[in-house]
Amino acid sequence: MTDSAKTIFIYAQTTRNGDLSPVVKELGCAALELSVKLCGAKICAVLLNKTDKAIQEIVECGYFDVLYCPSRCDFSTFSTSLYSKSLINLIKQENPYIMLLGATTEGRDIAPRVSSALNTGLTADCISLDINEKGLLAATRPTFGGNLMATILCKNLPQMATVRPNVLKIKPVEVYKNTQVVYFNPQIDDLTDEVKLIEFIKREQDKAGSLENAEVIVAGGLGMKSAEGFKLLKKLADKLGGKVGATRPVVERGWIDSSCHIGQTGKTVSPKLYIACGLSGAIQHVVGMNMSDKIIAINKDKDAPIFDVADFGIVGDVFEILPKLIDEI
């Protein structure tokens, strides 16, 4: 296979409203850089839930050479068996060099089924992608509890990886591609769907807005001392129109809901402003927030690792500094 014949497939996930999931554009932007290193590999999106809004977003974003859509079947409701079987059939037909998916609940459900059926490897929850000197996908992810970063290669095709949302930055596209829409016929006549969606109930915290999409986050660690300390963070977050986040040890102690957990085993965020209060900055937490535009750290330990990633650092007691900051705002 020549470099010009290589293709990069991206699973184009949609939201329940039929919009394109933000992680798709992150993957598309990363694929542009991978394509350059592969001497112009084609970038293809696979959109199973082919809503008009999602199709328009994919065509307009300018990342993709080809958009694959199913010609039949109802894909409006996510089905593990239907989606994975359709993706497997298309990959067997088109033989992509690389297959990328977002490390979302949906992506994590589909990816291992696809890789197993195709007898290929899968690097999960990646935080960066590159092409090595041999032209192979080099996917990097945290390992050993987040204490090390491992770069993993896949020896079979397609080389598969899932990437955590909000870790890859979206950059402006210099040259927009004229996306070709291609319809394919999924071979799923013998498919038995064993799981059906009966009802979808939106969580209360989701109704108030997603932590992942917040432009301002005020996060706390064990230095906040108790659940009472997080009320101070909530007050600051409300003043700034933001959300409250937390480290894993805080969640494990029950000081705050698990939906606020940011880090390797929690959510990945990239707000415009991240205020880290009373948290040390362990790598397990940092991998979930280090793509924030501006990071302000407040910690009384001047040697805390969080200062290594912060744009601005304040050495002092959060319980003395935060009330003054709130009053000033």
Image (cartoon, rainbow, N blue to C red):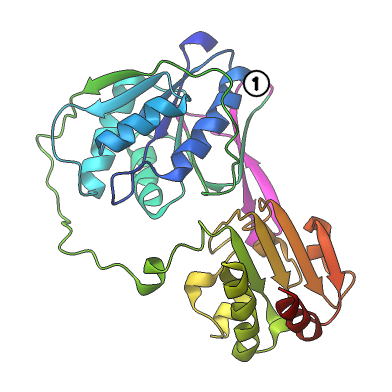
On the image, which quarter does residue 239 sit in?
bottom right
Front-most of 228 and 257?
Answer: 228
Q: Residue 172 location, x and y as percent? A: 59, 30
Q: Mark 1 points at which residue?
A: 134
User: Which corner quadrant of the image does residue 209 belong to?
Assistant: bottom left
Percent of width and height locating residue 141: 61, 48
Assign a secondary structure to mark 1. Answer: loop
- The picture places residue 162, in percent across and down from the top left corner, at 48, 43
What residue do we see at 60% from left, 85% from top?
Answer: 231
Q: Which residue is at a point 18% across and 58% down the rendered structure image? A: 197
Q: Quadrant of the C terminus?
A: bottom right
Residue 263 visible, this angle: no
Q: Residue furthest left?
A: 189
Note whether 111 is above or below 222 in the view shown. Answer: above
Residue 264 is inside the magenta segment: no
- Magenta segment boundaries in residue numbering: 133-159
Disc 1 marks a residue whose amino acid type is Lys
Q: Answer above or below: position of 292 versus 328.
A: above
Q: How many neighbours does mark 1 have within 10 angstroms: few (below 14), some (14-19), or many (20 or more)?
A: few
Residue 28: image location, x then y, percent: 50, 31
Residue shown at 89% from the left, 69% from the top: 303
Q: Which residue is drawn at 49% across and 19% down?
A: 176
Is 68 drawn above or below residue 228 in the view shown? above
51 versus 60 height, above or below: below
